[in-house]
Amino acid sequence: GHCHSPGCLSIELYADTGDYPGELLCKIQPVAGKSAAAQDEDNYLYLPPCMWSQQGNETVDGLPPAPVFFPHSKFHAIKRVNSSSYHYGIMAIFQSTGVYVK
């Protein structure tokens, strides 16, 4: 997920399919920087990615099994923003990758 700082509070992705009705797939809450170090500066926001296991229905290295979707699968996203932080271009998007399996 991607959303613009400084107002981004969270972004969530839900699946609305028969197999996953309204299931929360991914919730991202920005992590704020706390120092002067590179990519940890004050006002820097890091968006931790949502990740899944690539090995079937098994949890591997703490990653949950990857969800399965179909061409007719539907999704919806919810973004929460602090509107008291002035910023042009408030937006959000989920970018993802996947594979077709027969």
Image (spheres, rainbow, N blue to C red):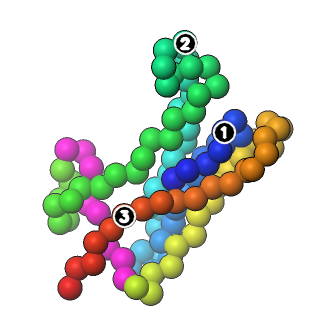
Type of residue at label 2? Ala
Magenta stretch: includes residue 63: yes
Relative to the observer, which residue lies in front, 62 or 49? Answer: 49
How many C-alpha atoms fall within 10 Å of the one at disc 3: few (<14), some, or many (≥20)? few
> Going 21% across and 59% down the picture, which residue do you hit?
54
Give the quadrant of residue 86. top right
* Residue 9 image point, x, y percent: 65, 42
Q: Is 84 on the left or on the right of 24, as rendered?
A: right
Q: Is 6 on the left or on the right of 84, as rendered?
A: left
Inter-mark Cα distance, 2 to 3: 33 Å
> Going 23% across and 79% down the picture, which residue do you hit?
101
How many C-alpha atoms fall within 10 Å of the one at disc 1: few (<14), some, or many (≥20)? many
Inter-mark Cα distance, 1 to 2: 18 Å
Numbered badge on residue 5 = 1
* Residue 43 image point, x, y percent: 64, 25
N-term-proximal mark, 2 vs 3: 2
* Residue 82 image point, x, y percent: 75, 42
Q: Which residue is mark 2?
A: 36
SS for callout 3: loop
How many C-alpha atoms fall within 10 Å of the one at disc 2: few (<14), some, or many (≥20)? few
Magenta highlight range: 61-70
N-term-proximal mark, 1 vs 2: 1
N-term-proximal mark, 1 vs 3: 1
Relative to the observer, which residue lies in front, 65 or 45? Answer: 45
> Going 79% across and 36% down the picture, which residue do you hit?
85
Type of residue at label 1? Ser
Up-down: is 93 above or below 8?
below
Up-down: is 36 above or below 32?
above
